[in-house]
Amino acid sequence: RGLGDVYKRQGIPSLLPRCSGTARRGEKVTQTTICFKMRKIERIFVHCTAGSQRQSIEDLKAEFRLKGWKYPGYHYVVDINGGIHQLLAIELVSNGVKGYNSSAINVAYMGGIDSHGKPIDNRTPDQKDALILLLHRLKQQFPDAKIMGHRDIWGTDCKKWKKYCPCFDAMSEYKDIE
């Protein structure tokens, strides 16, 4: 499967929000876009939600609120069917990787654990396609950003990982995305 096929299957012309001009006097405004100054992005972190693949986006948002977080842990989440959901504008700081959030965009897929709560790469083919599409778009916007898994901040020795997220080697899998 090529990237063009992924774009076609998603049927979405643009995933990344753009700031638009303002309406002139007398024009009807049908959509409001709030624009923030863009942060310097050094990393794009890939995560798993470490929950059920069937979890809803609303349930995930509720989890973040229960933690008392002002903003969610991820900018984007990919559901089991490959749907890409934006939870937070990329100009804002999410709560994905402590100590790195101010210069990172955080992306997650629904899943990452089995029925016993053990780490597992259970991404569906649709999730894999959608992640490639999303990461490609983000990499185009932030060409100097490094794509890495959450666990990669602790190096390659799995004994030093505080979590297995995203349950696969994101750096190797996405090393060729431009």
Image (tube, rainbow, N blue to C red):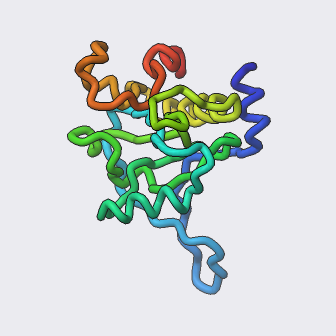
Is 55 situated above or below 43? below
Q: Which residue shows up at 59% across the image and 56% down it? A: 56
Can the viewer see residue 144 in this picture? no
Answer with the quarter of the image where residue 122 lies. Answer: top right
Instruction: Report the residue that reaches farthest toward the bottom.
Output: 26
Answer with the quarter of the image where residue 3 lies. Answer: top right
Which residue is nearer to you in this view: 108 or 11?
108
Q: Left or right of 51: which side holds 95?
A: left
Q: Which residue shows up at 39% across the image and 58% down it? A: 64
For the N terminus, the quadrant is top right
Q: Which residue shows up at 38% across the image and 25% down it? A: 146
Instruction: Report the residue that reaches farthest toward the front.
Output: 116
Is 125 situated above or below 54? above
Q: Which residue shows up at 45% across the image and 63% down it? A: 62
Which residue is nearer to you in this view: 121 or 5?
121
Across and down, in percent, residue 72 comes to 40, 56
Across and down, in percent, residue 10 comes to 73, 40
Q: Left or right of 104: which side holds 32?
A: right
